[in-house]
Amino acid sequence: MENKDVQNCTMIWYPSFEGRIPDMEKLKMQLNIIKSMKMKPNYSALAREYGIDRRTVKKYYEGYEGKPVKRNKKSKLDRYYEEIRNKLSIKGVTVKAVYEYLRDKGLDIGTYSNFNKYIKKKGIKASKKQECHPRFETGLGEQAQVDWKEGIKLISSEGEEIIFNVFSYKLSNSRYCYFEYRKSKTQRDLIECLINAFKYTGGVPKEILFDNMSSLVNIENGGRRRINNKMKAFAEDFRFKIQLCRPGRGCTKGKIETANKFIDWVIPYNYEFKTEEDLKQIIKNICIKVNTLVNQSTGVPPLLLFQKEKEYLSPLPNRSVMESYICSEHRVKVHKDSLVYYKGNRYSVPPKYINKTVTLEQRENELHIYYNTELISVHMLTNKRINYDYEHYKELLGRVMKEDLNEIEAICDRNLRKLDNFINSGKG
């Protein structure tokens, strides 16, 4: 066969693969046959036959195998895989909660959509609760819904277990939320939280929907529900109507149940905070974020709709009425350093009250601390972050040191001076 014939050769016989092998595989097989016969293919003719560029035919003839079916492209989320997996293993946590936690840490994790795809691709699962949420729409300023997120348990970076509740308040029309950290959920807590929510939103709705919480409702013989007198008086003074969910139908307050899911965003902070004050600030930050994110039901951030709804809220009662319901006492737990928190600063009590709950009462410029009815400590209110009574600190040192009394007193003097200098230097 002459060279001209060889160069013009385009079709070499090969078995019929019609319907069973893709065109590019056919082309590769045909080129291999041509190559084995030491013939030069007609690139243009083969390109027309397979509907591709002649340069592509030449690439395959010269050994190109094509792109791999699957590319093992690494994700930028791989570097956070262990942290993501560990956070999603926490009971009750959600994918959205972990995503927001990582964003708050300043990590480059991309969009929530891609984050969710990555979770599914890696087979990491978070427990999900199936809940019913029927839709009930209300007018501007007509309704708010209230609930408690109870018994949340987190551990600080110093190993201290903190069990707390979060008061959740949501305006039904705008979906604007208010969250507040509380150690207990007594009637006093409920009233104080409601007043704080009214102040936060700048007014009072026409009605508030509650479940059958014991601080609000008395259950009489025969199962009849009766709102207690204190809450009736409170509602009258603040000019709102109390509405109760039907027994066994908690899903009728679906909006506040949805808000409680946002409170779960605090769960990934397990071991990631130092003090209760840190925890309170985390909850405040979550509230701000929830109010500025686009709401799935309305398609806009709650903060935007709230600008209109707040015009329809009733004004707060006068100051004397509000103060009559606000108790100046606060119940807090004594930490292992024998300190309690009050308005951002710390004050000491005798070490024997560590891990006990005490009552704080402000009287003018003094902080009085009680255990049950016993007055155990009095401090002048200061701007210092840490306020140790000398005797309290000496007793605390004596519990952990074996030195004699004179040495303990010398160490106590030295440490307290250093502590004051450290705080005054602005490092505390």
Image (spheres, grey):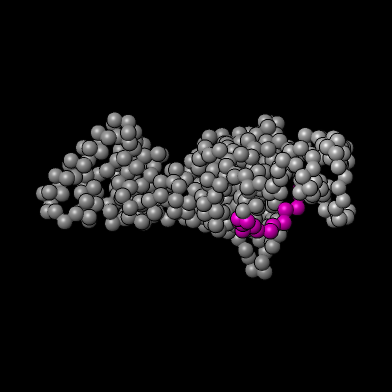
Does 133 appear in magenta?
yes
Magenta-colored segment: predominant secondary structure:
loop
Q: Is residue 391 visible?
A: yes
Q: Quadrant of the C terminus?
A: top left
**In the image, residue 304 lies at what x, y percent?**
68, 32
**In the image, residue 232 lies at what x, y percent?**
61, 50
**Above or below, 29 relative to 306:** below
Question: Residue 387 vs residue 104: left or right?
Answer: left
**In the image, residue 214 lies at what x, y percent?**
58, 59
Q: Please report the residue visible at 74 percent of the width from the left and 38 percent of the height from the top.
A: 59
Q: Please report the residue visible at 53 percent of the width from the left and 46 percent of the height from the top.
A: 80
Q: Quadrant of the N terminus?
A: top right
- Magenta span: 123-137
Residue 382 lies in what quarter of the image?
top left
Residue 302 lies in what quarter of the image?
top right
Q: Nearer the viewer, residue 367 or 229?
A: 367
**In the image, residue 216 lies at what x, y percent?**
59, 55
**Above or below, 7 relative to 135:** above
Does 209 appear in magenta?
no
Q: Nearer the viewer, residue 78 or 397?
A: 78
Question: Residue 115 vs residue 419: left or right?
Answer: right
Q: Is residue 47 visible?
A: no
Q: Please report the residue visible at 88 percent of the width from the left and 55 percent of the height from the top.
A: 16
Q: Nearer the viewer, residue 107 or 362?
A: 107
